[in-house]
Structures are given as structure tokens and as C-alpha cells.
Image (cartoon, rainbow, N blue to C red):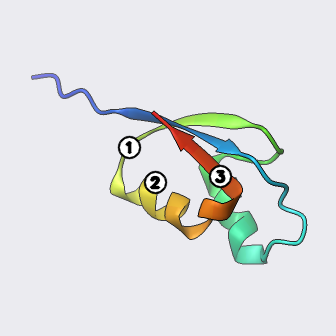
Amino acid sequence: MTTKTKKIQITLVKSLIGSTEKQRRVAKALGLTKKDQTVEHENSAVIMGMVNAIPHLLKVSE
């Protein structure tokens, strides 16, 4: 039984300078440390919750 989950690409489009400590921790938990860095995660409720915490800093594509 194979269930194929969708992968999403998350890119940090704005710098973390001037953001709050909580926003920085969320970005680090996603694996983003530098501007224009892209990571790939499975589309899950946990990941989407983190994305929704800092939508003004990220670009999400499938």
C-alpha cells in the first residue's frame, strides 16, 4: 500500500532581520536560514501551520 504525499517547496524570500524571535525559530524549524534558500517538505498539517505563522516571509509552491 503506497500513499503518495505531495511535496511542497518553501522559499525564504525576505530576510529574517527585523523579525521576532518566534518567527526566526519557525523559519529555523523549517530548515531555512538564508534568504532565497529553498527546502522541500511533505505537505502536512504541521508544516502548513508553520508556513501560516510566517506567510509574509515565504513563498510556497508545489
Q: Secondary structure at mark 2?
A: helix
Q: Position of residue 35 (x, y in %)?
A: 83, 45
Q: Secondary structure at mark 1?
A: loop
Total count of labels: 3
CB atoms of marks 2 and 1 within 8 Å: yes
**Residue tagged by mark 3?**
58
Q: Position of residue 56 (x, y in %)?
A: 66, 62
Taking depth in this image into account, of 57 and 46 the one nearest to the observer is 57
Q: Quadrant of residue 40?
A: top right
Residue at the (78%, 77%) spot, across then down: 20
Q: Quadrant of residue 22?
A: bottom right
Looking at the image, the residue that sits furthest to the right is 17
Question: Image quadrant for the C terminus?
Answer: top left
Q: Secondary structure at mark 3?
A: strand
Q: Position of residue 27 (x, y in %)?
A: 68, 57
Q: Is residue 23 left or right of residue 49?
A: right
**Crowd rating for badge 1 (residues with CA inside 10 Å; few <14, some 14–19, many 20+):** some
| Residue 47, numbered label | 2
Q: CA distance from mark 1 to mark 3?
A: 15 Å
Q: CA distance from mark 2 to mark 1?
A: 7 Å
| Residue 9, numbered label | none
- Identify which amino acid the numbered label 2 is placed on: Ile
- Identify which amino acid the numbered label 1 is placed on: Asn
- Identify which amino acid the numbered label 3 is placed on: Leu
Q: Is residue 62 left or right of residue 40?
A: left
Q: Is residue 14 left or right of residue 18?
A: left
Taking depth in this image into account, of 56 and 9 the one nearest to the observer is 56
**Residue tagged by mark 1?**
43
Residue at the (75%, 65%) spot, across then down: 24
Q: CA distance from mark 2 to mark 3?
A: 13 Å
**Crowd rating for badge 2 (residues with CA inside 10 Å; few <14, some 14–19, many 20+):** some
